Image (cartoon, rainbow, N blue to C red):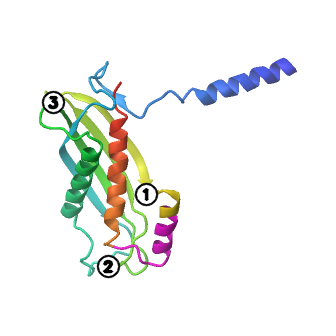
Amino acid sequence: MKKLSLSLLLLVVMISMSGCGSSMYNYVVKPTPIKKGASKYVIRNIDLKLEHGYGRNTENKTFKTESELKNSFKSFIEKALTNSSMLGSGKDFNIDLNINYKRIYNHGGNALNRPHFYYTVKVYDSNNTLLVDYSISKSTTKYSTFKDMAVGTEIAAFQWDAEDEPQDIELISNTLVRELSELGS
């Protein structure tokens, strides 16, 4: 009986660890020419789809349009790439992004909840060869503990609004750049 229990325990541990070595990155070219921590990137294209959750106040013109939101993402991503010494030029790796961003409105449509978003990233070399792609499933913003509590308080008080939305965009952009920094070997 002890041998059976030990064997069963070993089997459970092996099964639970089987996914530990997997990666969210799909490397198309192997070995990848991308060097972790050394490669530089240029945003070649951003496709952004803005969705509006229930309760939108169409009279409220303070929120960014889809085009303005796309420009904000590009600006914040380039800033994060610069801050990480990863912003490149034409000869470096090109990034195509497909971002789906859903605004979730609070009662009355003038304040926001946390957005829902997901995106796909494709990285190409200078010859337009796809090197790696990956995507994240539907997510929402999560700040550091104290910041997250402060944001939650503002949301609960219907105070998280158009002025605060750039903080969400910056957080998403920083997360995306952190993922890019993990690419390569």
Instruction: Tell me: 81 left or right of 174.
Output: left
Residue sitting at x 39%, y 71%: 112
Query: Residue 176 vs residue 151: left or right?
Result: left
Q: Quadrant of residue 75?
A: bottom left
Check if residue 45 falls in the magenta segment: no
Q: Position of residue 71 (x, y in %)?
A: 19, 58
Residue at disc 1, secondary structure: loop
Q: Looking at the image, which residue is at 76% across and 20% down?
A: 7
* 8 up-or-down from 69: above or below: above
The residue at which mark 2 appears reads as: 57
Q: Residue furthest right?
A: 1
Rounded to the nearest angstrom, the CA distance separating label 1 from label 3 is 32 Å
The residue indicated by pointer 1 is 141
Which of disc 1 and disc 2 is earlier in sequence? Answer: 2
Contact between marks 2 and 1 (CB within 8 A): the answer is no
> Residue 64: horizontal and vertical position, in percent?
24, 68
Q: Main secondary structure of the magenta part?
A: helix
Residue type, label 1: Thr
Magenta stretch: give its range: 148-161
* Residue under the image location 28 percent in, 22 percent down: 29
Q: Marks 2 and 3, Cα distance to the nearest angstrom?
A: 42 Å
Identify which residue is drawn at 34% across, 37% down.
Answer: 181
